[in-house]
Amino acid sequence: AVTREGKVYKLYIDGTLIGQDASSSNTIPTYASFALGHLLGQSSSFRFKGNLSDLRISSNVRYTASFTKPTETFSVDATTKHLWHVGPDPHPSLLDQTESGKRITVTGTTLSHEGPYAGVGGLFFDGVDDEAKLASLPKNLTGDFTLEFWTQFGPQSNAGARLLTFYDANNATMLNLALSTDGRIRIDNGGGPAVGVVSSSSYHNNLWHHIAVTREGKV
């Protein structure tokens, strides 16, 4: 998980607080877009190889300290802005489970039937040309939010492989979650200079890991 409080981002992996960064002030505006498994405008660089599953965006800070990672599929509640499930059956796009009904469009990805828990699959990216994206996010993330999802991966061929990246209307990076070739996970603002948090441990062990990001307060 990654969290943000005031002007502080916090990164949680499997419920453990990894670190925080107080230097980034980027917010995610209304009508932002996001991409999964790749960097917009790049044909082959920064491609992610592995699985992603169950993406939820909430309008509150769900985690303020280390926590026990979820053991069942995410559900829609009063603070859920968006929720995309993966599986159990293949579908050309993923439908938001909230009233927004927004679809994540996928290209080339395949469904893995072994997700992080029963009844949920994984969306597999081949690290070559698979990708998924949402053209516009109908609800802004300029206030409190929690972003969380599951991922599973092995060693990466591409340095800086993208798990998830948010963009503004000009396709400038607002929030970036990426991997190093040795399996460390980082968050940053994608700007110049890019600032953020990098895990000290590697996670390229082909096990499912819960990632979360939160922010509290407008900036």
Image (cartoon, grey):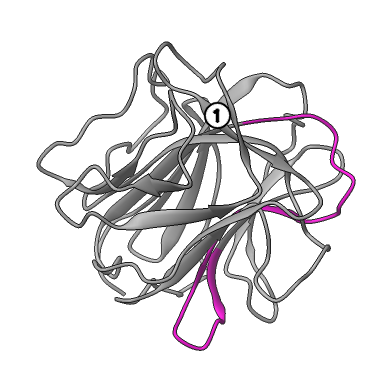
User: Quadrant of the rendered structure where residue 160 is?
Assistant: bottom right
Residue 122 as seen in the image, left or right of residue 168: right
Question: In the rendered structure, which amino acid carries the disc numbered 1?
Answer: Gly
Q: Which residues are magenta?
A: 152-175
Farthest residue, direction bottom: 170
| Near-viewer residue (101 or 158) | 101
Residue farthest top in this picture: 118
Mark 1 sits on what residue? Answer: 122
Q: Is residue 1 visible?
A: no
Q: Relative to 52, say whether 66 is above or below.
A: above
Q: On the image, which quarter does residue 216 sit in?
A: bottom left
From the top left corner, tell me how far across and down residue 154 is, in percent.
79, 29
x%, y% of residue 37?
65, 52
- Residue at (23% x, 54% y) in the render: 101
- The image shows residue 144 at horizontal and vertical percentages of 25, 58
Q: Residues within 10 Å of mark 1 (few under 14, many from 20)?
A: many
Residue 198 drawn above or below residue 173: above
Check disc 1 and report its element: helix, strand or loop. Answer: strand
The magenta stretch spans residue 23 = no
The residue sitting at 29% across, 70% down in the picture is 142
| Viewer-closest of 89 and 77 | 89
